[in-house]
Image (cartoon, rainbow, N blue to C red):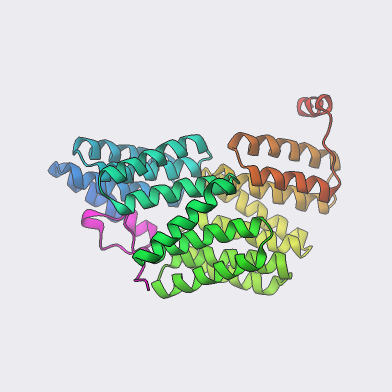
Amino acid sequence: MYGKAFAPEYQGTLDSLSVNSSLADVLAQADARLRAAESAGAVQEAARCGLAVAEANRRLGNVGAAERAWRASYRAARSAGDPAAMAWAAWSGGTLARQRGAMALARRLLALAAELGERGGSVHARGYALAGLAETGRIQGDYEAVEALHEQLLAEARRRGEARHMVWALEGIAQMHRNTGRYDSALAMFEEAAEIAARADDRRGLAWALRGMADVVSVRDGDTARALGLLTEAAALCGAMDLAGALAYNHKMQANVLYRAARWAEARKLYEQALAEFRDLGEPRGEALARLGLVKSLAHLGRDPARTSADLDELHRTLEAIGLRHARRMVDTARVQLGVAVRPEGEEDEAMAA
């Protein structure tokens, strides 16, 4: 059994906020409460409100403001001698680092958050930090290292009846199954996550689950209509909550579905839209994935193979720098599918100089 989803990152005087609260509303309230706490010299409350400011800004794509807010929250928590609040601030910073493509920094901050959460006796801070470490490894394609941790965190969430973490863990495991060709189990887990999220009123989790379902029914069944319908439902949820990052990934997935249906001109437009959104958000992983889809679409629309090859070379370097193993394999697969060979090093340098 499990209860309604809740948002432990909204703390102190903000603990009445819902996991489904509009991020614009969260930011407005958190900013006001933060200023009041700072004026009153309430350092611990300032740390808690600063966390909400950081998370709202991060999810809205305000990267600079999010960076300043989590650091200020960490400093306030440290001055208050509150390791649990320090853990939450470090978790926010680690999550932001992953969003920005700084995977090594993300791992360091999330490991620190897990340590501080344990020291401060915060089960939730420790659990979110471990989940962040697991997600970082999954995004980098290091499935062997993190699949067991996903399973462990799912079991813990089931024991405590934490719907939001159950949904997160199910979606993470499902994504690894989908990426390794285990489509049936992936779809079953995405569907379970969607059911739990709907019953627990976790609209963010539901949106991600619907996106995962759409991906699987598109790639496994070729059911374009059902996939686009699921993504339309997910997009409405994202838009209502101002989930800019989730909406950008939704647009990219819509483009993926259209690409698989050989509707390349439509896919191109959505990849271009997603690419612009990811650039605005400062999210290099999403930007690289949208660029890959755009390059593939343009190739099918008659683009010069030499330019396609140059773009794939650049994408491979970008993904190598971020450390995304699965995405690098996607570039290699694209070469085979498009019939574009790897160019000799001298030719690549000459093309770059042109």
Please say whether residue 299 is visible from this viewpoint. Answer: yes
Q: Residue 241: horizontal and vertical position, in percent?
A: 43, 63
Please say whether residue 56 is visible from this viewpoint. Answer: no
| Left or right of residue 235: residue 252 | right
Q: Nearer the viewer, residue 42 or 176?
A: 176
* Quadrant occupied by the C terminus: top right
Q: Which image quadrant is residue 78 in? A: top left
Who's the residue at 50% across and 35% down the image? 104
Q: Farthest residue in the left direction?
A: 40
State the extent of the magenta-drawn residues as a range: 1-27
| Left or right of residue 292: residue 64 | left
Q: Is residue 19 magenta?
A: yes
When the figure is inspected, residue 204 is found, relative to residue 133, above or below; the finding is below
Who's the residue at 66% across and 65% down the image? 183
| Left or right of residue 89: residue 196 | right
Q: Residue 175: horizontal and vertical position, in percent?
A: 59, 58
When the figure is inspected, residue 173 is found, relative to residue 336, above or below; the finding is below
Q: Which image quadrant is residue 226 in? A: bottom right
